[in-house]
Image: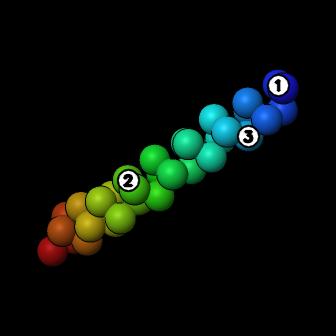
Amino acid sequence: QRVSRLSQERAQLEQKVLKLSPMMEGSLLKSYD
């Protein structure tokens, strides 16, 4: 049970990062302008 729970939490974190990364990249590109 522990392993599956950890993998679920990691998957949720990865989804959040994937959603945030495009925004981060966009802000970085804007700052370079």
Snapshot quadrant of residue 13: top right
Seen in the image, is 10 located left or right of residue 2?
left
Mark 1 Cα shell of 10 Å, populated few (<14), some (14-19), many (≥20): few
Q: In this view, does 18 lie above or below 16?
A: below
**Element on which disc 1 rests:** helix
Q: In this view, does 3 lie above or below 25?
A: above
Q: Residue furthest front?
A: 1
Residue type at mark 1 is Arg
**Element on which disc 2 rests:** helix
Residue type at mark 2 is Leu
Mark 3 Cα shell of 10 Å, populated few (<14), some (14-19), many (≥20): few
Q: Quadrant of the N terminus?
A: top right
Q: Mark 1 points at which residue?
A: 2
Q: Where is residue 33 in the image (x, y as percent from the top left)?
A: 15, 74
Residue sitting at 30 percent across and 60 percent down?
23
Q: Where is residue 2 in the image (x, y as percent from the top left)?
A: 82, 25
Residue type at mark 3 is Ser
> Mark 1 against mark 2, which lies toward the viewer?
1
> Mark 2 against mark 3, which lies toward the viewer?
3
Q: In this view, does 20 lie above or below 25?
A: above
| In the foreground, 27 or 32 | 27
